Image: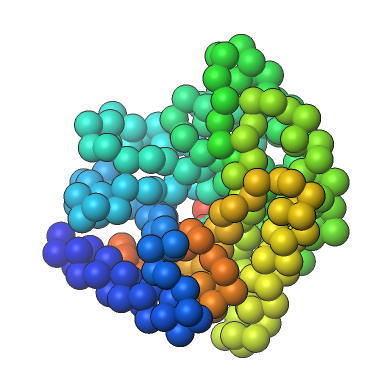
Amino acid sequence: MSFIIENIANIKYRIRVAAEFSNRNPAEIKLLLATKTVSAQNIITAIETGETLIGENKIQELKDKYEELKNTPHQTHFIGHLQTNKVKEVTKYADCIQSVDRLDLAEKLQSRLEFEDKTIDVFIQVNTSYEASKFGVSPENTLTFAQQVKQLDRLNIKGLMTIGLFSAETEKVRKCFQLLKNIQIQMLEKDFPVYELSMGMSNDLETAIEEGSTIIRIGTAIFGKRPYPDSYYWNDNK
Ligand SMILES: *Cc1c(COP(=O)(O)O)cnc(C)c1O
């Protein structure tokens, strides 16, 4: 599957160019492999290039690939919409949840983690594009929500995640990323350790890096096109 290896090299190059353009150190920017619909074998090919961070959108897929991936060292972030009835599985199969966006979910995670006597890293997902089709807490409510999550001692808030507007108009996409960056600055001032900004995908990683992204989540540009539009994968009822 040499196309995967070549595509990863190409993404690393894009990261380097974008980082240099904005006077950033490329080493500050982590690559997360967005592996929805990708076979375990192809994921292993990618991990073996040294990229050990993967992201899955659906609990079922996480479970299906778990056995095949477990002997290949990697970390798994959950990046899809998480239903409250999947809390037990997510704490079992994921190392970090990037899509915490509502209090009932956060509270269910807390009780499950108390039961298991462990903690988990989380990101707060923010709906910076204000699109109704997207999940995430609204930018205005992020700080209040973060204060509530902070009370839940089994959840370690590590950062913020967003999906930028789908648009060919770069400046509109950039506004989403700037908004997330501004929320991060406000939160850092209030002593929330939200050092990670998970933003940027195949089509907008350069803009995201220019605006301060520390984790870009790349699927299509590495593994090729998926059979359905992304809205399909975000809705976990399907
Ligand atoms: C699919 C997905 C990605 C990767 O998107 P590409 O455009 O394929 O790079 C990133 N983040 C989330 C939340 C996704 O669902």
The correct choice, above or below, for 102 with respect to 131 in the image is: above
- Give me the residue at 51% from left, 39% from top: 96
* Along the line of sight, the residue nearer the viewer: 123 or 86: 123
Report the residue at 58% width, 58% height from top.
197
| Relative image position of residue 114 (x, y in whole percent) | 64, 15
Res 42 visible:
no
Residue 229, horizontal then vertical, whole percent: 51, 64
Q: Nearer the viewer, residue 90 or 197?
A: 197
In which quarter of the view is residue 120 placed? top right
Name the spot of residue 49 as percent of width and height, x first: 20, 55
Residue 193 rendering spot, x and y as whole percentages: 65, 46
Give above or below for 167 relative to 227.
below
Q: Can residue 3 be seen in this view?
A: yes
Q: How many marks?
A: 0
Say which residue appears at 62% left-offset and 35% top-offset. Answer: 156
**Left or right side of 42 for 224:** right
Q: Which colour scheme is used?
A: rainbow
User: Is 12 placed left or right of 57 in the picture?
Assistant: left
Report the front residue among 133 and 169. Answer: 169
Could you tell me which quadrant the N terminus lies in? Answer: bottom left
Q: Which residue appears farthest toward the left when viewing the image?
A: 2
Residue at 71% over, 33% down: 106
